[in-house]
Image: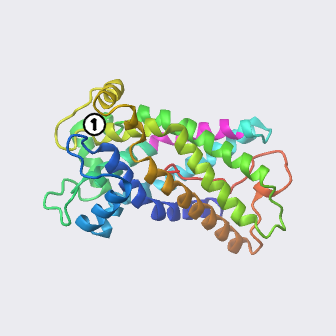
Amino acid sequence: MDFVAGCMGGAAGVLVGHPFDTVKVRLQVQCIDKPLYRGTFHCFQSIVRQESLLGLYKGIGSPMMGLTFINAIVFGVQGNAMRLLAKDTPTNQFLAGAAAGAIQCVICCPMELAKTRMQMQGTGEKKSTRKLYKNSLDCLVRIYNREGLRGVNRGMVTTLIRETPAFGFYFWTYDVLTRSLGCDLGDRYMIPKLLFAGGMAGIASWLSTYPVDVIKSRLQADGVGGVNQYSSIADCVRQSVKREGYMVFTRGLTSTLLRAFPVNAATFATVTLVLMYARGEEPAPMDCEPPQPGPHTQIQQQPSSL
């Protein structure tokens, strides 16, 4: 039931946060010489005006498809790592989260590649007349047919560099905040505290690795128009800094942070409610119980979009 609750919570998070993710990707990869968008809110307005509200949900099929597999990997690895580490401490939460983040990249990287390509398709068009990809699965199949496994795993190194510390900081921050807020089983503000901790943990994890995410998005979007601009990670960093300065690493950060809190709030609220009704008891997350040996909690489960 914890797995089902986590998957439902992750789905809720994707539905809430995907429009912000679309804005983030558009801002990260737009050409600086002829920018289409002046900022986060202008990008949001332009997409809705030019491509309709559904334009904000382009590529959502990919994270939805990968959600179950990603959650299964994250839940299993994080729980087993905590059992191996034996002691439930913030440091061990970081190590277990980092391990989970690294291993789930196998699913996360192709999923985000398809998501990014779909989000860039038909930019500025309400009804795209030249759809290269029918859906996320078709996108991955076409990339595989053209470029093989290497093409499907484009951006794997940057995804690994991003996800490993990001999940570590996520679980560490969540653990520290839930302990500091002093959750008790009878606390009427337990759920708001839990949601606040989850939202802030999501923000902390994004801040810790955001520059890497900018490079990952650019590498995965590279070649959409048939021309590859970057030959490697280092080349992408060099060209990006040369043309746009170091502020390039903050492209889309506003929409990311705006997305991080509600995504995590939706995720944890859904997990809590599903567990509560399934077990027929008051929502009492294990994070708020007195410290015991073993894994910290099953409600800490978080999808890779953070």
Side of 140 where 82 appears, left or right:
right
Q: What's the residue at 63%, 66% (across, down)? A: 269
Give residue 257's position: percent from left, percent from top: 50, 52
Of 258 and 274, nearer the camera is: 258
Secondary structure state at the residue bearing disc 1: helix
Give residue 274's position: percent from left, percent from top: 64, 70
Is 45 above or below relative to 212?
A: below
- In which quadrant will I find the N terminus? bottom right
For the residue marked with disc 1, what is the amino acid? Gly
Report if residue 106 lies within the magenta region. Answer: yes
Is 167 above or below relative to 230?
A: below
Is 288 above or below relative to 224?
A: below
Residue 197 seen in render: yes
Side of 62 where 3 appears, left or right:
right
How many discs mark residues in the rendered view? 1
Give residue 146's position: percent from left, percent from top: 21, 39
Q: Which image quadrant is residue 96 in?
A: top right
Q: Which image quadrant is residue 5 in?
A: bottom right
Q: Main secondary structure of the magenta part?
A: helix
Give residue 221's position: percent from left, percent from top: 29, 42
Q: How is the image coloured?
A: rainbow
Residue 114 seen in render: no
Query: Looking at the image, which residue sits at the far left?
Result: 129
Q: What's the residue at 83%, 61% (across, down)? A: 184
Q: Which residues are magenta?
A: 93-107
Q: Which residue corresponds to mark 1?
A: 148
Q: What's the residue at 62%, 49% (across, down)? A: 201
Side of 292 where 217 appears, left or right:
left
Report if residue 52 lies within the magenta region. Answer: no
